[in-house]
Image (cartoon, rainbow, N blue to C red):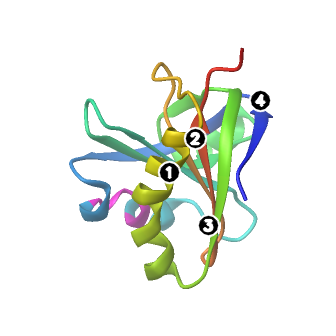
């Protein structure tokens, strides 16, 4: 079920790669540095530059310094959401088509990047930035 939600900006550390997300090693590199337990993981993809960023939410500069990774802010604002559940491989295959489906139902905001929130390896929430009029 799709819905609209307002997100606050999210401060993250990240690793990145360029090219199609399915060929990215950004998460593998991030997970070597940031423990899975107790952290929230996100991803963004810029289709114009083909930059894929695997991200982990941080609460303060001390935490960012411990990881030694660059920091960025994932934009807040209004987003259309969809949730995917199932096996990880199955979910990954559905990310692109689900974002495409959201873009057909909502007026997307191309000034912000779509977000993937990895709630669990079997549950991902997709956020498509939208224009709220």
**Quadrant where the image shows the C terminus:** top right
Compare residues 47 and 15 and report the one nearer the observer: 47
Q: Is residue 56 left or right of residue 20?
A: right
Q: Earlier in the sequence, mark 1 or mark 3?
A: 3
Q: Position of residue 5 (x, y in %)?
A: 78, 38
Q: Earlier in the sequence, mark 4 or mark 2?
A: 4
User: Badge 1 local density, few (<14 within 10 Å), some, or many (20+)?
Assistant: few
Residue, disc 3: 35
Residue, disc 1: 101
**Quadrant where the image shows the N terminus:** bottom right
Label 1 to label 4, Cα distance in Å? 24 Å
Give yes or no for contact between labels 1 and 4 (Cβ–Cβ under 8 Å): no
Q: Earlier in the sequence, mark 3 or mark 2?
A: 3
Residue, disc 2: 105
Label 1 to label 3, Cα distance in Å? 33 Å
Residue at x 69% of width, y 56% of height: 40
Label 3 to label 2, Cα distance in Å? 36 Å
User: Which circle, 1 or 4, is nearer the viewer?
Assistant: 1
Give yes or no for contact between labels 1 and 2 (Cβ–Cβ under 8 Å): yes
Q: Is residue 84 visible?
A: yes
Label 1 to label 2, Cα distance in Å? 7 Å
Q: Secondary structure at mark 2?
A: helix
Instruction: State whether residue 115 is above or below residue 46.
Output: below
Q: Position of residue 91 (x, y in %)?
A: 50, 73
Q: Secondary structure at mark 1?
A: helix
Residue at x 46% of width, y 80% of height: 90
Range shown magenta = 24-28
Q: Position of residue 97 (x, y in %)?
A: 42, 58
Residue, disc 4: 8
């Amino acid at each position: 079920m799709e819905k609209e939600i307002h997100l606050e900006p999210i401060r993250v550390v990240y690793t990145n790669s360029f090219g199609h997300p399915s060929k990215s090693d950004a998460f593998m590199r991030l997970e070597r540095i940031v423990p899975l337990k107790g952290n929230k993981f996100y991803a963004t993809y810029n289709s114009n530059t083909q930059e894929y960023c695997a991200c982990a939410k941080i609460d303060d500069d001390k935490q960012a310094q411990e990881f030694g990774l660059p920091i960025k802010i994932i934009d807040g604002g209004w987003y259309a959401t969809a949730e995917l559940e199932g096996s990880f491989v199955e979910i990954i295959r559905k990310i692109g088509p689900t974002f495409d489906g959201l873009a057909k139902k909502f007026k997307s905001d191309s000034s912000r990047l779509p977000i993937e929130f990895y709630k669990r390896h079997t549950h991902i929430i997709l956020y498509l930035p939208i224009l709220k009029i």
